[in-house]
Image: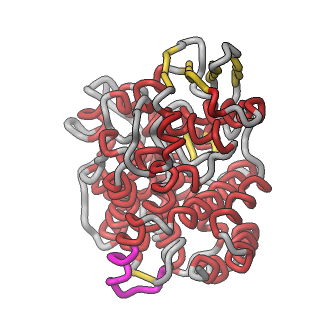
């Protein structure tokens, strides 16, 4: 059948350039941006982030690095900020694809917006459009893409970064198609890197490479016609020929897939959220009897076992995807913040000893947001807690005040946190991004 009218690539390009996000979308986007900056601030002390910041600031520029001292050129700033926002696995999760949409797109659009002197509304509109692109790619490829081992945040995030940047760079529809074609050549990332610094290279690379593709498209670097429908292109190859590009643009501008994104309460894999809710509750029930724990059983969604059944993690990064560490540290402390997923927490003898008593079982009756934790004590007592909708899920979302608290905890200093909260809250009506850039640089 001969196609009439614009193809999927052109329709998506026109969307990212012209869409007027509704108020609901802009409100959520502003909250997601604040959350991403909180996550970047929380990650700034990691050894991996210090290394990345030192690399980024070698390049002359004026774009601040979120959570780190110094400035860099837009590409390196995008790379660092995206990597930092996702480093602790503390950012967000698109349901059901498991994509983290904000980090790679925010890295690109913050850099482009600050560098080009755009307004707050322009920034939020670009971030919303870019997140929508990333979520749509993730939806049409799921669940096979992630299950096959592709790190969906990097592989799909690069398209969102390219789209969001294209809007701020004020590209034409044709140039935006070229940007998608360029982004396609850089789409990579692997689940096997989770728990290591290499994961951050992939997420940071998605932001940098999406922005680079848009910048070069603006300079006239062309790409294939209709790259998203291309034979032997991204969707064709990674979708094994089973993904129809038209699905990418179905209900475009009517249904916003990015609204199916949950902001995270804990710095770990999303499947651990209900486990942590249950263990934090059980900590109170234990009432000082933690030394009597004989066994801990976690029952949950199949991904709980396939992605987090990792006994004896050796670093804070690995602890983010270890059910054994998460359950042990929450049962012992009643907390699950960045400190509980640090190298020091992983090395704690009591946490390691209790982690050895934790087993992970599959119970397909649980959704991604549910789990049951059972603790058996040496006197035969059994304590159990079942969670149906974890805190931070779509059914129990974090509030604006929750994100403010998260940012304050991440900054550890009200003199740093207050200007950043104020700048994020005012960004929608800001004529420029100077206040936000100054607050980002005020670490």
Residue placed at 56% from the left, 20% from the top?
A: 297
Frontmost residue, 339 versus 98: 339
Is residue 306 shown above or below 151? above
Q: Is residue 254 visible?
A: no
Name the side, left or right, on which 136 lies relative to 76. Answer: right
Residue placed at 74% from the left, 61% from the top?
A: 404
Residue farthest along the right direction in this orientation? 401
- How far across and down, in percent of the image, does residue 108 sit? 45, 65
Question: If the image is split into quadrants, where does the C terminus sit?
Answer: bottom right
- How far across and down, in percent of the image, does residue 283 sit? 71, 35
- How far across and down, in percent of the image, does residue 94 sit? 55, 39
Question: If the image is split into quadrants, where does the N terminus sit?
Answer: top left
Residue farthest along the left direction in this orientation? 232
Name the side, left or right, on which 333 lies relative to 422. Answer: left
- How far across and down, in percent of the image, does residue 116 sit? 50, 79
Residue placed at 57% from the left, 26% from the top?
A: 368
Residue placed at 36% from the left, 87% from the top?
A: 60
Coloring scheme used: secondary structure
Name the side, left or right, on which 36 lies relative to 4. Answer: right
Q: Which residues are magenta?
A: 53-63
Frontmost residue, 378 versus 334: 378
Name the side, left or right, on which 409 lies relative to 251. Answer: right
Q: Is residue 431 visible?
A: yes
Asked if the stretch drawn in magenta spans residue 437, the answer is: no
Q: Quadrant of residue 388?
A: top right
Frontmost residue, 349 versus 44: 349
């Amino acid at each position: 059948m001969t196609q009439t009218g614009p193809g999927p690539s052109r329709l998506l390009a026109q969307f990212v350039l012209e869409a007027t996000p509704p108020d609901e979308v802009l409100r959520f986007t502003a909250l997601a941006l604040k959350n991403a900056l909180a996550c970047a601030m929380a990650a700034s002390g990691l050894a991996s982030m210090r290394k990345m910041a030192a690399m980024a600031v070698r390049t002359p520029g004026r774009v601040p690095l979120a959570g780190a001292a110094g400035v860099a050129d837009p590409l390196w700033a995008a790379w660092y900020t995206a990597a930092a926002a996702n480093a602790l696995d503390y950012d967000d999760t698109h349901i059901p694809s498991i994509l983290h949409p904000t980090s790679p797109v925010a890295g690109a659009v913050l850099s482009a917006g600050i560098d080009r002197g755009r307004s707050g509304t322009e920034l939020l509109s670009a971030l919303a459009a870019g997140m929508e692109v990333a979520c749509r790619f993730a939806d049409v490829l799921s669940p096979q893409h992630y299950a096959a081992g592709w790190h969906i945040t990097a592989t799909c995030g690069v398209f969102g970064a390219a789209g969001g940047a294209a809007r701020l760079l004020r590209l034409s529809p044709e140039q935006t198609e070229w940007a998608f074609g360029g982004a396609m050549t850089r789409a990579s990332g692997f689940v096997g890197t989770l728990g290591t610094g290499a994961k951050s290279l992939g997420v940071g690379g998605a932001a940098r490479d999406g922005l680079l593709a848009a910048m070069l498209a603006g300079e006239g670097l062309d790409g294939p016609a209709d790259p998203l429908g291309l034979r032997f292109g991204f969707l064709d190859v990674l979708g094994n020929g089973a993904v129809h590009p038209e699905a990418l643009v179905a209900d475009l501008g009517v249904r916003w897939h990015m609204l199916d994104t949950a902001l995270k309460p804990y710095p770990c894999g999303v499947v651990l959220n209900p486990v942590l809710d249950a263990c934090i509750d059980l900590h109170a029930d234990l009432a000082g009897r933690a030394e009597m724990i004989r066994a801990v059983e976690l029952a949950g969604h199949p991904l709980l076992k396939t992605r987090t059944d990792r006994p004896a993690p050796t670093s804070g990064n690995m602890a983010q995807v270890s059910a054994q560490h998460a359950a042990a540290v929450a049962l012992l402390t009643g907390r699950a913040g960045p400190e509980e997923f640090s190298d020091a927490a992983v090395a704690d003898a009591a946490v390691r000893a209790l982690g050895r008593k934790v087993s992970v079982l599959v119970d397909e009756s649980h959704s991604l947001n549910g789990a049951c934790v059972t603790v058996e004590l040496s006197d035969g007592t059994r304590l159990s807690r079942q969670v149906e909708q974890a805190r931070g899920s779509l059914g129990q979302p974090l509030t604006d005040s929750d994100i403010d608290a998260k940012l304050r905890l991440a900054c550890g200093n009200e003199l740093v946190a207050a200007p950043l909260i104020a700048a994020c809250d005012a960004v929608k009506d800001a004529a420029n991004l100077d206040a936000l850039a100054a607050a980002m640089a005020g670490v």
